[in-house]
Image: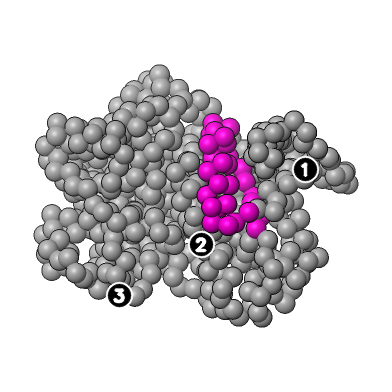
Amino acid sequence: MTDGDDGLLESTVSPYQEVLDALSSLITKRSRGDKSNKRVLFDVLFDYLKMLDLDEPISKMKIIHVAGTKGKGSTCTFTESILRNCGFRTGLFTSPHLIDVRERFRLDGVEICEEKFLAYFWWCWDRLKEKTDEDVPMPTFFHFIALLAFKIFAAEQVDVVILEVGLGGRLDATNVVQEPIVCGITSLGYDHMEILGHTLGEIAGEKAGIFKRGVPAFTVPQPEEAMCVLEAKASQLDVPLQVIPPMDASLLNGLKLGLEGEHQYLNAGLAIALCSTWLQRTSHLEINYLEQTSSLPEQFIKGLTTASLQGRAQIVPDRCINIESPGDLVFYLDGAHSPESMEICARWFSLAIKEDDQQPTLNYQPQDDVGSSRELVQKDYHGTSRKNTTQILLFNCMSVRDPHLLLPHLMNTCASHGVHFKQALFVPNISVYNRVGSHALPLTDLQVDLSWQLTLQRLWESLIHGGDAKNIDTREEGKDDTEKSVISCENSTVFPSLPLAIKWLRDSVRQNQSVRFQLRSEAWHLMPKTPLVACGSLCNEVPYVFPIAGLHANI
């Protein structure tokens, strides 16, 4: 290749792609369980704040800080929506992102525009590149992302900042905040144990690390071991800690929460407490719920019922199939990745498909609508509810997860509701460990390692056969030279990529138009216009992709 050709290639890289490449360079190869320098990495954050002149702006922010194992993103989403509907300019920082890194930064409920993102990114990048050295090197990926969030919210002069902890709490990058207005701890459980500890007490201690002296905090009902630690930490810091019960659904005056699932009433109750306390402590007493018990302010109701968060109990019909009944392939998406969350997700899926089957007119959220999850499009699927239905699971999880805990919880909870998957599809992550942009996701990889997916498949077949996996018959179904073979068993199939699994699903629908497919999918990173039911997880430092699907299908 000539220099001229090389220059031509370089000129085709977009300004946004340059940012993604720069971000990718910050992703470390360090093991997530490496605790050797966590404290050092956290302490150096304060050096970065000085380099970026963010100390004073952060001290003036009116912050709501939320940690927890399950429900952090949902609680933060409810909180932001309520306060935005109260008339405040909001800044919301969450993680991870599903498709685009800009999803992590929301201004007034909308992800930051590309133009502003580029400007703020290079402002931070250039200053850190100039001032860092061997002693204080460039921050890691998530640390930089958190610093960027503080810069964005300071420059945009938001009224309230809602921060979702990335991982843990005590040593999380968001915990550079010294004086939040109020703190929240969502449901606690076993997750990231290689980092946070192997007991609920240890995990609770890390989460309680966001408590600040004298700053009020709220939590939801917790296991006794976890609650004892939270209460002890609160007592040490003179933190008034209150336990908030699930929200009473009748307070919505007949409406539904914007986020689906019964478990969301727990997160909604916590969000109400956080917002009410924020309003009180910032002297906005004209809107106050703390003294009321039988009704919610109109702004609270609108915020709760219009909140939207992709990949959480999300129902999306596949609109890419050129057939008369687009409801014949429906994906139910959720991001569950712990045993407790898997049970909740399985219960939601089971109830949701039964509800859909009973309704001749189905309501679905269009996938390209990232506004309110309650802004649904009503569509008559030509009586598809009278068709037979088939449930299919599309699944993957990280190797650091224990599928012996996840899959039985999923299967048993669904079975208890009379739901049984006809097929389970296992696919690898369509991502690489050192890239941020979706450009880095190969659709076909002849060298892809399917050993983990085969392990998941063997476990699934073992569960189907009551624990006996000795006589499981597997077969390879040959494809042409451009596609690696799929590995099939009686009740499951391993595909070398998510796109191939989606193609198989669509082909199955076209060939069996007397059946509706209902797909439960656990996938954080979705193909454009591909509906999935997702249960997976993303590391804040690496753009992992976890396809899992609960498929409700008309086969």
Q: Which numbered disc covers residue 489?
A: 1
Residue 196 placement: quadrant: top left
- Where does label 3 land, which residue? 253
Q: Residue at x 19, y 69 (%)?
A: 294
Q: Point out the stretch of residues depicted in magenta.
A: 391-420
Question: Which badge, 1 or 3, comes first in the chain's sequence?
Answer: 3
Could one spot residue 119 in this view of the protein?
Answer: no
Question: Which badge, 1 or 2, comes first in the chain's sequence?
Answer: 2
Could one spot residue 493 in this view of the protein?
Answer: yes
Circle 1/circle 2 CB separation < 8 Å:
no
Q: Residue at x 30, y 75 (%)?
A: 253
Q: Position of residue 71 (x, y in %)?
A: 38, 49
User: Whole-Å distance between the Cαs marked 2 and 3?
Assistant: 22 Å
- Where does label 2 land, which residue? 351
Q: Position of residue 330 (x, y in %)?
A: 62, 64
Name the quadrant of the N terminus.
Answer: top right
Q: Is residue 146 left or right of residue 11?
A: left
What amino acid does circle 3 point to?
A: Asn
Between 102 and 291, the one nearer to me in the picture: 291
Name the quadrant of the C terminus.
Answer: bottom right
Between 306 and 128, the one nearer to me in the picture: 306
> In the rendered image of this protein, does residue 477 appear above or below residue 195?
below
